[in-house]
Image: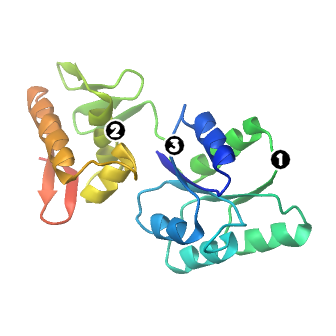
């Protein structure tokens, strides 16, 4: 899972990322205009949003995102603690509102709760067809054999299995697996898809990864 932290206080943003990185991948954006654009990529599962941002304030960013059909969970994190500010944030589409200073344990609990509420907590094992992907040891198990995956192989496979039978774009895979600041290109995705196809064949899988021309990949039953 990938979380977008839109916060212009770099030190605070990095502190949040350092806490959450034990469970989630996090990207940091310090500008409201860029943050709005990044939200629309569909590459994120949640956003943590400051209200006082350069370029575009958090409330305007949030309202615009909701109008455009972006419904991922949004946690507002701000120094504005007045009742009217909290009401405005929630009425603008936020799912939760935390004021600074805050406790990191509370932040972590809120993030987990919002993602759980959205139904996007990934269980330890993901199964589809006769294949099971284990989050605990990064293994892929078939009817009679199992094989270990590298971290990026696991990440790609998890995204495809969570979105089974739905097309996942190369751009989404690059952002979620390699990060928004990466130099990774589409060829990186193609290489890892090839690795996974070979491992599925080795396991005797009754599922496969198909290419949707110019769109991306999806995992389907054979």
Q: Earlier in the sequence, mark 2 or mark 1?
A: 1
Q: Secondary structure at mark 2?
A: helix
C-alpha gap between disc 2 and disc 1: 33 Å
Whether label 3 touches label 2, CB < 8 Å = no
Q: Residues within 10 Å of mark 1 (few under 14, many from 20)?
A: few
- Which residue is painted at 38% across and 49% down in the image? 176
- Which residue is painted at 68% across and 65% down in the image? 94
Rendering coords of residue 88 (x, y %): 79, 74
Residue assigned mark 2: 155
Residue assigned mark 1: 101
- Relative to 2, does residue 43 appear above or below in the rendering? below
Rendering coords of residue 185 (x, y %): 22, 52
Residue assigned mark 3: 121
C-alpha gap between disc 3 and disc 2: 14 Å
Q: Earlier in the sequence, mark 1 or mark 3?
A: 1
Q: Is residue 43 left or right of residue 59?
A: left
Between residue 100 and residue 75, name the one nearer to us: 100
Between residue 126 and residue 36, name the one nearer to us: 36
Q: Nearer the viewer, mark 3 or mark 2?
A: 2
């Amino acid at each position: 899972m990938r979380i977008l932290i839109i916060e212009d206080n770099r030190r605070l943003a990095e502190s949040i990322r350092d806490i959450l990185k034990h469970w989630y991948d996090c990207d940091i954006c310090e500008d409201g205009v860029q943050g709005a654009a990044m939200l629309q990529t569909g590459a994120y599962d949640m956003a943590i949003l400051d209200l006082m941002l350069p370029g575009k304030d958090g409330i305007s960013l949030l309202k615009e995102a909701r109008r455009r059909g972006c419904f991922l969970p949004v946690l507002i994190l701000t120094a504005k603690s007045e009742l009217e500010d909290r009401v405005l944030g929630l009425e603008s589409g936020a799912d939760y509102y935390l004021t600074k200073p805050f406790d990191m344990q509370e932040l972590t609990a809120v993030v987990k709760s919002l993602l759980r509420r959205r139904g996007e907590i990934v269980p330890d094992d993901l199964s589809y067809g006769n294949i099971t992907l284990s989050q605990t040891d990064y293994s892929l198990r078939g009817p009679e054999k199992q094989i270990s995956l590298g971290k990026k192989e696991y990440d790609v496979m998890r995204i495809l299995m969570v979105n089974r039978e739905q097309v996942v774009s190369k751009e989404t895979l690059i952002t979620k697996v390699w990060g928004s600041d990466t130099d990774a290109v589409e060829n990186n995705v193609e290489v890892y898809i090839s690795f996974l196809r070979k491992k599925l064949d080795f396991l005797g899988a009754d599922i496969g990864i198909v290419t949707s021309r110019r769109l991306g990949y999806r995992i389907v039953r054979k």
